[in-house]
Amino acid sequence: MRACCSVAMSARCRIPVAVVALFALLAAAQAGACRLPPFALTYALERGGITVGEVVIRFRYEGEGRYSYRSDTRTTGLAALFAGQRIEQRSEGMWTAAGPRPVRHEQERERGGEVARHRLDLGPMPRYQGDAGQWLLAVPDAVYDPPGLLLALIRAERCGGLQGSYPMVTETGLLRRFRVERGVPVALEALGETWQTIPLAREEVNGPFRMTLYLAPEFEHLPLRIDWSDGEREYRLRLQDAEQG
């Protein structure tokens, strides 16, 4: 009787083990799908349909769960001749099961020979440092810097879990909250191919800022186009070149 029970129990035990293994594989696959691939994207910066600059964004992993994000913005053509400007942005953080968690953000903006620097430390004691001084920040624990918010939205569209509201601290240390909604898929062309894109509108709550990301599922949900307005001016980033890995 015991032998029969033992055999029966061992047969039954194979099912839970198989189920656990299946769930483990699914969880691993889901985690892989939620992890953004390293990339380098080059965008044309347009204003009023005229190209006025170039933006290069690089994202990669540094090991031990850390990531780095860097963007370089430079005016080109007549815009560079009459109103030359350069903006370098660097962000570092940890890539967790819940997505990006920024820990440091730096920005350097040069215009007309003058340089302005800003730094955010988003560790246990969030702090702003810049040319005007430094002070502690009253922000939520899970606050994003600007690059972190972009990465979080892309990740949410890749694997689900898009939230209705996201807190973000600007490069100057101001806390903003953004409301997010998905739009109707549209077709966009970039790099000589046409892809279906899913617009994500990001709007500041009680503020003038609005941004729409056009994310392409066929392109790892990376943005083919980014439109934004600060209430007075409208800009567009249009993808020109891309490298992954």
Image: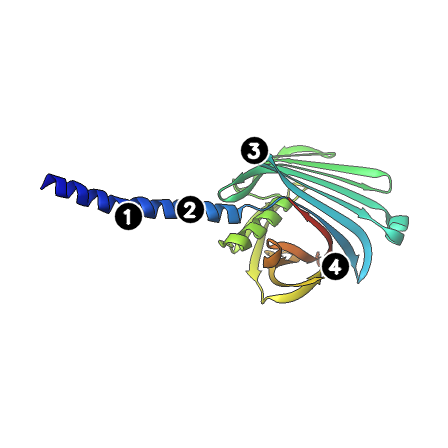
Residue type at mark 2 is Leu
The residue that label 3 is drawn on is 123
- Give left or right: position of 147 versus 5: right
The residue that label 4 is drawn on is 232
Residue type at mark 3 is Gly
Number of other residues with Cα within 10 Å of mark 4, as a class: few under 14, some 14 to 19, many 20 or more: few
- SS at circle 1: helix
In percent of the image, x 82 and y 49: which residue is there?
75
Q: Position of residue 86 (x, y in %)?
A: 80, 43
The residue that label 2 is drawn on is 25
Disc 3 versus disc 4: distance between alpha carbons?
Answer: 34 Å
Disc 2 versus disc 1: distance between alpha carbons?
Answer: 15 Å
Question: Closer to the N terminus: mark 3 or mark 4?
Answer: 3
Which numbered mark, 3 or 4, is in the foreground of this view?
3
**One can see residue 208 in this view:** no
- SS at circle 3: loop
Question: Closer to the N terminus: mark 2 or mark 3?
Answer: 2
User: Is residue 178 placed above or below 142 in the rendered structure?
Assistant: below
**One can see residue 240 in this view:** yes
Q: Position of residue 132 (x, y in %)?
A: 73, 35
Question: Closer to the N terminus: mark 1 or mark 4?
Answer: 1
Which numbered mark, 2 or 3, is in the foreground of this view?
2
Disc 2 versus disc 3: distance between alpha carbons?
Answer: 33 Å
Residue type at mark 1 is Ile
Depth check: 189 or 229 in front?
Answer: 189
The residue that label 1 is drawn on is 15
Disc 1 versus disc 3: distance between alpha carbons?
Answer: 44 Å
